[in-house]
Image (spheres, coloured by chain):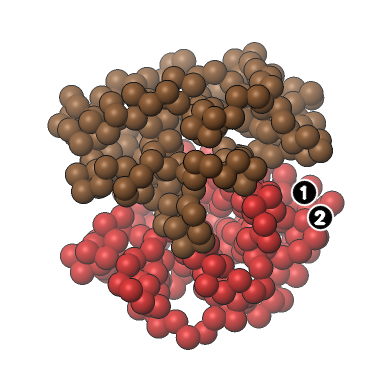
Chain colours: A red, B brown
């Protein structure tokens, strides 16, 4: 397998963290330079017309895009430790919280960064600052919900670490670009969870 | 099982169409009046603090939110006909195209409608018209991509009908609110696929 990826954005990080949790270390990496627009050039477009990283090239030559779909594939070829559910029912409940985190927290953070951060002006055209600022409010609402959720559960999906913690962690870390720090905004559960996840070896993958 | 749902929005429709394809007809429905704000009142919040429909109440009293997670659960309790992949590898590839449709096509359509349609002004506060208009352009870009994809494949995921067709169909139908009709914009493959899917019994579920 070969992984087309980039350093910095939260989606490539999700897959790197998933790989590290699985203990998969033998995948070749191809770094795609987003600032140089490599993801929109013919070479990469032939691999993924949707212009996105991460992208996994399988040994049979097929390409698999979308972070979570790549994780689903990796979960199949390397089932242990389980990160996405041991049966269909648990898989559905983990998918629920993972999507709630992705749509409410992750996407509002990404939208806030993309539409308000000067460093993203070249990638996100056009930027809508008002929309980005409103997304920053949604980010805080979602973070407060997740903070209260973590008051009752040690991990996003309940009692054990799963893909949903990876999604949330990569989102919260990316939010540092817009100076969001949960502990400074009274979200003690979220800060404690963040610090706990940051202590895992996979967090520096 | 009991399904909390609403008439009109595309996410409840995804689950209704999935249920119809599965031939599951014995689920009790509870209609939630979004215009009256029922989804933000105490009764519903106790069931789903994220205020979203559809929401599935299981026979053991647990609540499962998020359209696609509900579909994953239904696929487990009613495996035939298969709509999400027969093994882990096929599941990953169907998840890929389903997410590409959801993030590029479905979400740009929903954002365009929410931020530009007067009828959605009460639900989407505040509306950002410029952002909504730009999302309308992204919707057309994504629709053109999907149109070219359908030139080579009869269905979204390839040779057979899957959940990804449901996601795309509910998106395209919702786009009628902003007067988007693929055939009128030169997207003949997309229009032909849409008309074919519209002919399925599940399309009027």
Query: In the image as oriented, which residue stretches furthest toward the front?
Result: B80
Residue identified by numbered label 1: A149
Residue located 19% across and 44% down the image: B151
- Residue B45, percent across and down? 75, 30
Q: Nearer the viewer, residue A143 or A61?
A: A61
Q: Where A31 falls versus B170 (above or below)?
A: below
Residue located 64% across and 74% down the image: A80
- Residue A75, percent across and down? 56, 67
Q: Which corner quadrant of the image does residue A198 belong to?
A: bottom right
Q: Is residue B130 visible?
A: no
Q: Are discs 2 and 1 located on one and the same chain?
A: yes
Task: Tell me the quadrant of the picture where the N terminus of chain B can be found.
Answer: top right
Instruction: Judge from the rendering whether residue A61 lies leftward or rightward of residue B163; answer left or right.
Output: left
Instruction: Judge from the rendering whether residue A31 lies leftward or rightward of residue A159; answer left or right.
Output: left
Residue located 72% across and 44% down the image: A145
Q: Where B50 falls versus B85 (above or below)?
A: above
Cα separation between marks 2 and 1: 7 Å
> Which disc number belongs to residue A153?
2
Q: Where A76 falls versus A114 (above or below)?
A: below
- Residue B193, percent across and down? 27, 33
Q: Which corner quadrant of the image does residue A129 belong to?
A: top left
Question: Chain letter of disc 1?
Answer: A
Q: Say whether marks 2 and 1 touch (CB < 8 Å).
A: yes
Q: How many labels does the image show?
A: 2
Question: Chain letter of disc 2?
Answer: A
Crowding at label 1, few (<14), some or many (≥20) Cα neighbours within 10 Å? some
- Residue B133, percent across and down? 33, 31
Residue located 66% across and 32% down the image: B55
Q: Where A112 falls versus B23 (above or below)?
A: below
Q: Is mark 1 on a helix, strand or loop?
A: helix
Q: Is residue B169 visible?
A: yes
């Amino acid at each position: 397998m070969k992984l087309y990826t980039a350093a910095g954005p939260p989606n490539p990080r999700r897959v790197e963290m998933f790989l590290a949790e699985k203990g998969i270390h033998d995948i070749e990496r191809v770094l795609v330079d987003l600032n140089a627009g490599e993801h929109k050039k013919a070479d990469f477009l032939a691999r993924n017309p949707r212009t996105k990283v991460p992208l996994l090239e399988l040994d049979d030559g097929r390409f698999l895009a979308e972070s979570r779909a790549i994780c689903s594939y990796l979960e199949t070829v390397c089932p242990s430790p389980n990160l996405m559910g041991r049966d269909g029912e648990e898989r559905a409940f983990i998918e629920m919280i993972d999507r709630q985190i992705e749509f409410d927290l992750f996407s509002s953070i990404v939208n806030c960064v993309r539409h308000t951060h000067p460093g993203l002006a070249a990638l996100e055209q056009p930027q809508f600052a008002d929309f980005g600022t409103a997304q920053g409010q949604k980010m805080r609402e979602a973070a407060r919900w997740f903070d209260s959720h973590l008051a009752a559960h040690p991990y996003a999906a309940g009692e054990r670490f799963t893909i949903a913690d990876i999604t949330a962690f990569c989102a919260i870390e990316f939010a540092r670009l817009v100076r969001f720090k949960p502990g400074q905004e009274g979200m003690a559960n979220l800060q404690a969870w963040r610090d706990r996840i940051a202590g895992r070896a996979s967090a520096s993958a």
